[in-house]
Amino acid sequence: MAISTPVAPTTSGASAERPDVIVIDHVRKRFVVRKDNTIRERIVTLGRAGRKHRQDFWALDDVTVSIQAGTTVGLIGQNGSGKSTLLKAIGGIIQPTSGTVARRGRLAALLELGAGFHPDLSGRENVFLNASLLGLSRKETEERFDDILAFSGIGDFIDTQVKFYSSGMYVRLAFAVAVHTDPDVLLVDEVLAVGDEAFQRKCLDRIRSFQEQGKTIIIVTHSLSQVQEMCDRAILLNKGKVLVDGDPVEAVAAFRDVLEERRQGETNRDVAPGRGRVVSATVQPVGKPHGAPVSPGDDIEVTAEFEHDDGIEDWVAALQINSSAGQVVYGVTNTTLGLDLGRLEGRRRFRFVVRDVRFGSGKYFINVSLIDSAGRHVHDLPECDAFDVPFYPRAVGTVHAVPELEELD
C-alpha cells in the first residue's frame, strides 16, 4: 500500500548537477477559434470578412522551462491554462507556433484515454501496437506481456475488442503498457484519477519506483495534494504563461489564490426579494487580521449576517467548512449548540467561534446557510470566504497532529 509522505523540494545545487532532459525555449502555441460555426456561415464569410469571424487563442505564451533528469514535476492551473497543451508539446504530439522543445531519452506519454489504441483490435493486439509506438520490439513486448496483463487487471478481456472496454479498462491497459516500456521520461495527464482505489495505489507505487530509479516524470493533475506529496517541483500556468515555477507548496498556494480570485469574480449574491438570505460571512483567526493564516491551535471566528423580509420563526444558522477538494471537514448549527436564535425579521448579525482548530495544511472554505424549521435551505452562501493553514512538512492530510516514531523491543 502506498503511503503519502511529503517530498522535500529539489535544491538548486542538486538540480544543477543533473542534465536537462526537456528544454522548452520561448514556446508559443496558437489555436484559431472560429465564430462562424456552420458551413453556410463559412461560405458567406469566405474571402471578404473571414478574419472578423476568427479569433486567435494563445494556449501557450512565451513559456521557457528546463526540466532536469530524475525530477518529478507537476503542471497545475485552471482549465484552459495550457497544461495539457504544454504536455503535448513536450511529447511531440503538437508542434509549437514558435519556439522549440528539445528532449532526450525514451519518452512514454499517457495523454488521453486509450490514445494509440484501435477500437476494432483486441486488447492483446493493441498492447503490441501501442508498445511498438512507444519503441519496443515485438520480442521485448512478448517478454513483458504477462507483466503488462497482470498490472492492468484486464484478465480474460484481453482478447476482447477494446471498443467494448470501459474508460477505466482503456486507461489501465494503456498505463500498464507505458510503464513497462522502461521510459526515461513519463508524461501523465490526469489518468491517475481513473480506476478503482487499488489500481490508483498500484499506479502511484509504480511512479514512486520510477522516482527511486531516477526517472523523469511530468504530471498534469487537478489533485493539489498529489502535487505536494509526489512532486519536487511544480509549474503553475495561468492563461498560457508560467506564473510560478519552483517549490510545490508555494505553487499550490499561488494556485489557490488564483482560484479564489476567480471564485470571488463569479460569485452572484443576488436573491429574489421577499425571502430570507445570508447577506455576508467572513472568517478570521481570533486576535488576528482578516486574511491571516490559521495555525493549529488557533480559534477562528465566522461573522455572518442574516435577514428575512417577512420574518421567520424557528430558523437555523448553519456553518460548514470544506477543504479545497470539497470534503466537509467541520459543521455546526445553533441547534447542535442548543441555542434558540428567536425570530429573524430584518437583519441580524451573529458570530460563530470555533476553538482550538487542528486543520491540516491547505485552503479551507466557509459555507453559511439559513435553514427553516423543516430543514429546507432558504438560502446558502457557498464558499463565501476562505482561510489558509500553513504547510506542515512532517505529515499530510486534513487533520493536524504531531507525529512521533519509536522502535519497539
Image (cartoon, rainbow, N blue to C red):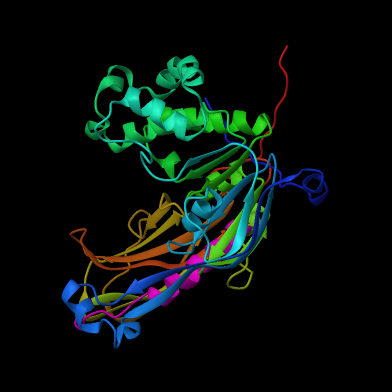
Q: Is residue 45 above or below residue 247?
A: below
Question: Residue 273's spot in the image, x, y percent?
Answer: 21, 84
Which quarter of the figure has residue 209? Answer: top right
Q: Quadrant of the C terminus?
A: top right
179 vs 47, nearest the viewer: 47
Which quarter of the figure has residue 117? Answer: top left
Q: Is residue 228 left or right of residue 191?
A: right
Is residue 298 at least partly visible in the picture? no
Query: What residue appears at the point 28 percent right and 26 percent down from the top-left corner?
Result: 122
* Residue furthest out toward the front: 47
Which quarter of the figure has residue 164? Answer: top left
Q: Is residue 309 magenta?
A: no
195 vs 93, nearest the viewer: 93
177 vs 276, nearest the viewer: 177
Taken as a whole, is the magenta stretch helix, strand or loop? helix
Q: Is residue 233 left or right of residue 300?
A: right
Question: Residue 312's spot in the image, x, y percent?
Answer: 21, 73
Q: Is residue 18 above or below residue 176?
A: below
The stretch of residues the image draws in magenta is 251-275
Question: Residue 248's spot in the image, x, y percent?
Answer: 63, 52
